[in-house]
Image (tube, rainbow, N blue to C red):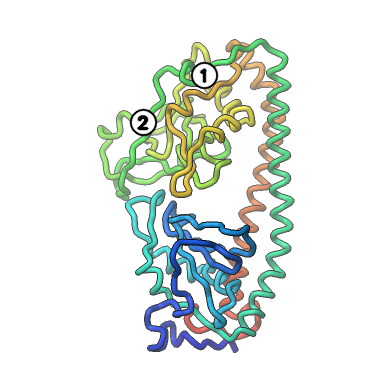
Amino acid sequence: MLKTTAVQAGSYEPTHNKGLPEALEPRPQFEVRAGDLLMTCAGPRARCGVPTLVRQTPERLMMSGKMYRFRPDERLDPRFLELWLLSAPAQKRIDAMKTGISDSGLNLTHDRFVQLPVPVPSLDEQQRIVGLLEDHQSRLDAADSYLTTAGARGAVLYGQLLAAALAGVEADEARLSDLLAVGLANGRSVPTQHDGFPVLRLTALRNGRIDLSERKGGAWTQDDAARFLIERDDFLISRGNGSLHLVGLGGLVVDDPDPVAYPDTMIRARPNVERLTAVYLAMVWNSPLVRRQIEAVARTTAGIYKVNQRDLGSIAFPVPSLADQAAVVRKVQESRDSLAAVASVRMKAITRSHSLRRSLLTAAFSGRLTGDQPTKGLQ
């Protein structure tokens, strides 16, 4: 049976009534060393409150001001603590502690976080759980490595296909800002209101297209949203992301949309149809040719990479005649569809891997992985 020394029926004994054990007292924001546990305390929902165990580090590495640092003493194996903090029960409690007005900028205050109950089984039991989890996760790590390699190879192949198609036509290089019917335009941040006028979520940007079903109700009227309504062949670009390889990605509105607006997390580009077709823009924009430029100008703030209208407007790419743009699209499209099918399978595999990791953690801390009873305080 999994036993604890610091958790009784989901709360601490009087000697640990401040939440986290005294062994986890946060230290000043100075040097990081192996064995430290770092916790992000600001950023988007998916990144705020995520723990990372420092396993090795160069000398005199300093931590960010957007992190908490903890150094468990002999009562806790830091690997066990990291894994438990990543588990669904812990993350659910941590998520409820976050404050902020939008999912893109949340905070986890120290006073709230230290109230989190943490189970402390015997060290032998902690190490047994860690060993089982690391054994299973090492297999998932190997699978994820293959999936990452496959994704990189797909991106390279797509870039080569596009380059080969462009090599067969004459093209002048132009900046995005010179190819638009109207200037680049940011969306608007709107509080959620279930029965309000709809606005897209950032998750609508998917595989180079805009999924019109990814939306929420906003606290505004259609008149308020008039300047932000999207049209067919609009191209929407992500303003920011916690991952550099995702910031600045674009998605094309391929269908005639019902009235719906785009949010402040996106920038709208509306091509001048006399110079640029929307489908060609979508094809070239997410290619390595443009990605290199975007990643070079992206700036990071509080762990979020961002681009602005000036950055995007300066992005340059080859622009053939309209007839040649159509020819390039036809030439690349067939191979691109095959690559997209492969990418879809790859993304499903990645999602499955993430799901398996969460399931492993849940099983381990509920006793199903070890064959024991659940640890008190984990339910």
Of marks 2 and 1, which one's residue comes earlier in the chain? 1
Toward the viewer: 136 or 64?
64
Q: Is residue 191 above or below residue 223?
A: below
- Count residues near mark 2 (Cα–Cα under 10 Å), then give few for <14, some for 14-19, many for 20+: some
How many numbered circles are shown? 2
Going by the image, does 149 lie left or right of 55? right
Residue at left offset 70%, top offset 59%: 141
Give SS at disc 1.
strand
Disc 2 to disc 1, how far (Cα)?
25 Å
Q: Amino acid at mark 2?
A: Leu
Q: Quadrant of the N terminus?
A: bottom right
Going by the image, does 114 lie left or right of 252? left
From the top left corner, tell me how far across and down residue 94 is, in percent: 43, 66
Residue at left offset 68%, top offset 12%: 169
From the top left corner, tell me how far across and down residue 155 is, in percent: 68, 36
Going by the image, does 167 lie left or right of 66? right
Q: Is residue 140 above or below residue 246?
A: below
Q: Amino acid at mark 1?
A: Arg
Residue at left offset 56%, top offset 69%: 82
Going by the image, does 9 lie left or right of 4? left
Toward the viewer: 276 or 258?
276
Name the residue beneath numbered marker 1: 175
In the picture, residue 285 is in which quadrant? top right
Name the residue beneath numbered marker 2: 229
Give SS at disc 2.
loop
